[in-house]
Amino acid sequence: CTMTTILAINPGATSTKLALYKDEKCVWKDEIIYDSQDLDSFPHVFDQFDIRLKDIEDLLLRHHVSTIDL
C-alpha cells in the first residue's frame, strides 16, 4: 500500500493558500499573504508567477518538504 501525497495550491487575489495531504489526512495548511499594492506593480496576473513560485518554494522549505517527495 503506497501513501498518496497531495500539495493543494490555491492562488487568490491577495494570497496563496497551500495545504499538504498524506492520503486523506491534512498534514499542514498555510497561507502567503500579499499586499495588494505590491501585486498592483504587475501588469498581468501571470506576471506574478515568479514571485509566487519563490514564495511557495520558501514555504515548502520552512515545512521541510522537498519537491522530490511530491
Image: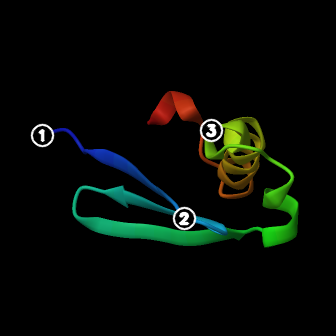
Compared across the picture, whether 22 is left or right of 58 comes to left
Q: Earlier in the sequence, mark 2 or mark 3?
A: 2
Residue type at numbered disc 3? Phe
Q: Which mark is residue 12?
A: 2
Kindly state the secondary structure of the residue where label 3 is placed. Answer: helix
* Residue at the (78%, 43%) spot, across then down: 51
Q: Which residue is labeled 1 in the image?
A: 1
Q: Nearer the viewer, mark 2 or mark 3?
A: 3
- Rendered position, 44 above or below 30: above
* Residue at the (74%, 35%) spot, across then down: 50
Given contact means CB atoms under 8 Å apart, are the residues at marks 2 and 3 in contact? no
Compared across the picture, whether 61 is left or right of 24 comes to right
Kindly state the secondary structure of the residue where label 2 is placed. Answer: loop
Compared across the picture, whether 54 is left or right of 3 comes to right
* Residue 21 found in image quarter: bottom left
Kindly state the secondary structure of the residue where label 1 is placed. Answer: loop
Residue type at numbered disc 2? Gly
Q: Earlier in the sequence, mark 1 or mark 2?
A: 1
* Residue that lies at the very extreme toward the left in this rendered image: 1
Give the percent coordinates (x, y) of residue 28.
50, 69
Give the percent coordinates (x, y) of residue 35.
82, 72
Q: Which mark is residue 26?
A: none
Label 2, label 3: how far apart the Cα atoms are? 12 Å
Closer to the camera in the image, 29 or 53:
53
Q: Which residue is labeled 3 in the image?
A: 46
Residue type at numbered disc 1? Cys
Q: Nearer the viewer, mark 3 or mark 1?
A: 3
Q: Earlier in the sequence, mark 3 or mark 1?
A: 1
* Residue at the (59%, 71%) spot, across then down: 30
The quadrant in which the C terminus is found is top left
Label 1, label 2: how far apart the Cα atoms are? 35 Å
Closer to the camera in the image, 7 or 33:
33
